Structure formats: C-alpha cells, structure tokens
Amino acid sequence: MKKIWFLFLITVLLFSTACQSNGTIKVNSNNTSTNPEQDKTQSENTNTTTVEPTKPEIIIDKNANENGKIMILMYHGIGEEEKEWVRTSENFRKDLEVLYSKGYRLISLMDYINNNIKVEAGYTPVVMTFDDGLLNQFNMIQEDGINKIDPNCAVGLLEDFYKDHNDFGRAATFYVYYPVPFRQKDLIKEKFEFLINNGYEIGNHSYDHPSLGKIALEEVDKQLAMNVTSTKSYVPNYVVESLALPFGEAPKGDNYKHVVSGSYEGTEYLNKAVLKVGSNPALSPNNKDFDPLKLPRVRASELKTEGTGIYDWLSYFEKNPNKRYISDGNPDVITVPSTEEANIDKDKLSGKELRIYDK
Ligand SMILES: [Zn+2]
C-alpha cells in the first residue's frame, strides 16, 4: 500500500511539473526555445507506473486563444529605396524587431495549415512569404572566391536576425517562377538546397507569372505543373505543396480547382495551400471557416496599404488582443476561451485535446 502511495505521489509531482511549464504565460521572456518533447517524455514516463493517476488539474493560461487570427505576411522585393512592392533592408529588419518584441514567432506555412503550431505559451505565430524569386530576396556574392549570402538580401537579413534571436524561429516560403528563380542561373540548386536545409520552403508561383484567371485552363495546368517539374529538376525529392497566385488571380467558380490540383505531361501538382494577395489576417486552422485553399495575406509594407498593412494589423491586435492567436505552448492541446467554442471545427482536431476555459 505504501508503495502505491509513493508511486501516486511521484506521478502527481511529475504531472504538476509538466503542467507548470505548459500553463505559464511568458510574453517577452528571454527563454530561448520551447521544448515540447521534454514535457511529452515526462508524461510518457508516468504512464509506465502501475497506478492510474487522477486527471491532473490543468492550469489554463487565461490568455491563450488558439482560435485567434494569424498573419501571413506578403513581401516582394528588398531594396535600397522603399516602394510599393519593395521594402528597404532597414525596414525589413525593423519589421523583424517589431514582430519579435511584440511576441510574434515565425512558423512555416506548412506547420500552420497542418495545425502543427509549436510556439511557446503566450506567443503568436506569424507566417512569412516572399513572391517572385527576386535577386534581392536571395543574392550570393563572392568573397575570396567563396559564395556568401549577401547580408542585405532577405535570406541574409533573416539569417542574421535568427543568429541573435534563435527563439524567433527560422521560416519563410519563397514563391518562385522560372526560368531563373533568384536570378543567378548557376546558383539555383545551391540556393534551393540552402533554403530546404534551413527551415525555409519553396512554393509555386507558376512557370512564368501570367494571370491564371486570364489564360485557358489547360494553360493553368501547364503553368503550375511546369513550375513543379522545374523545381524538381534542381531538388528532386522536394515536394512543392503551396501556391501563391500571381497577381492574386485564379479561374472563377468551379474552375478554381485547377489551381489546387492537376497535371500536365505526366507531372502532377497538388497544392495544400493557395495564397491570395490581400489583405487581412488568416483564420486559425481550428476555425470552422478555415479554408487553406483561399488564404488571405497581409501586405508587409507601409506604402499604399489603405489600412491593411502589417503595422495597421499590428495595432489592430494591440487594441483587440482577443482577436489574436495566442498559443498555449502545447501543440497537442487546443485551448480557447468559451466565447470561441462555437467557432471551432471539432471534427478537424485530429486527436488533439480541446480545452475550453470560461471567459
Ligand atoms: Zn508575383
């Protein structure tokens, strides 16, 4: 009997340790990274004891809202002069600083649509995208005969920021078109491999950037399949899984399905996510209206944004914190206030536990 009590106590202790690390809010803390595996291991270990523990009391983070909105930021060029579709290196760095200090953390587009959000408790995920595969997004320069990433291109700036802020995360999707993504013909493979090996994604932006709403449907299939064939010619094992619509345009009505899947001359394409051009934050993947095939993006610019740019939405979330996705720190548990319960798609939780707290 004494032994059973002892095991029970150990179990309770282990569980309460796990709960504390999950349930505490840590906005603006300097902790370097989440370690969800640690908690998981602790929970698994407790399962090996013979005593069935009473369900531990979970301290629910009163600020968590995993049905809040998530920004998918849309960038184009990074250059010396700020323009409608160009951000200067200084402004891009400012964006990273502001996002970081306001508690945003990078996640990949695929982790977002697969509902595999692993940011620490109290933080908000943000997705970053770059369209057009421009040289100033990923430029290599030669130094002493060695290829180096230009510190002022998007990848250089992201890498530099990550070096000093590991906990910000390392992710972005680059939507490229052909024939020369990133505009250095001999370095395409090297750049693609760097991206894939360092947490970035390569997306489909058609073969040569026509408006997919203005060409024949067979041409749409050809444009999207040829992008996939071309990317695979450099990185054969890479699966292109998302599309950013050139000019934000697509075939109408039932023909929209051509941007989702199709084939041309034996190459098939299947987009799990399709991104539009404007102009508001996207729904949580837990939301009943979440549609990964029609995802809105937020323009990461301060020019001509008409109230829908990155800074407009950042201040919107400051004023409306209840609209912002705030993580509970545990990717296997979905935590929402009771006010959001009706907006959750319970059929899509795929084994995740849903926790609702009163608000
Ligand atoms: Zn484009």
Image: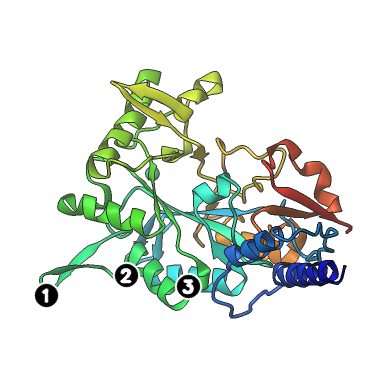
Q: Residue under label 1, please give it.
A: 144
Q: Residue under label 3, please give it.
A: 166
Residue 313 appears at what percent x and percent y? 63, 59
Residue 344 appears at what percent x and percent y? 76, 43
Q: Amino acid at mark 3?
A: Asn
Q: Residues within 10 Å of mark 3 (few under 14, many from 20)?
A: few
Q: Quick one: label 1 or label 3, which is nearer the N terminus?
A: 1
Q: Residue at x 41, y 23 (%)?
A: 262
Image position of 261 with respect to 49: above or below: above
Mark 1–mark 3 contact, CB under 8 Å? no
Q: Amino acid at mark 2?
A: Asn
Q: Quick one: label 2 or label 1, which is nearer the N terminus?
A: 1
Q: Residue at x 47, y 73 (%)?
A: 166
Image position of 87 with respect to 250: above or below: below
Mark 3–mark 2 contact, CB under 8 Å? no
Q: Nearer the viewer, mark 2 or mark 1?
A: 1
Q: Is residue 94 visible?
A: no
Q: Quadrant of ligand 1?
A: top left
Q: Nearer the viewer, mark 3 or mark 2?
A: 3
- Total marks in image: 3
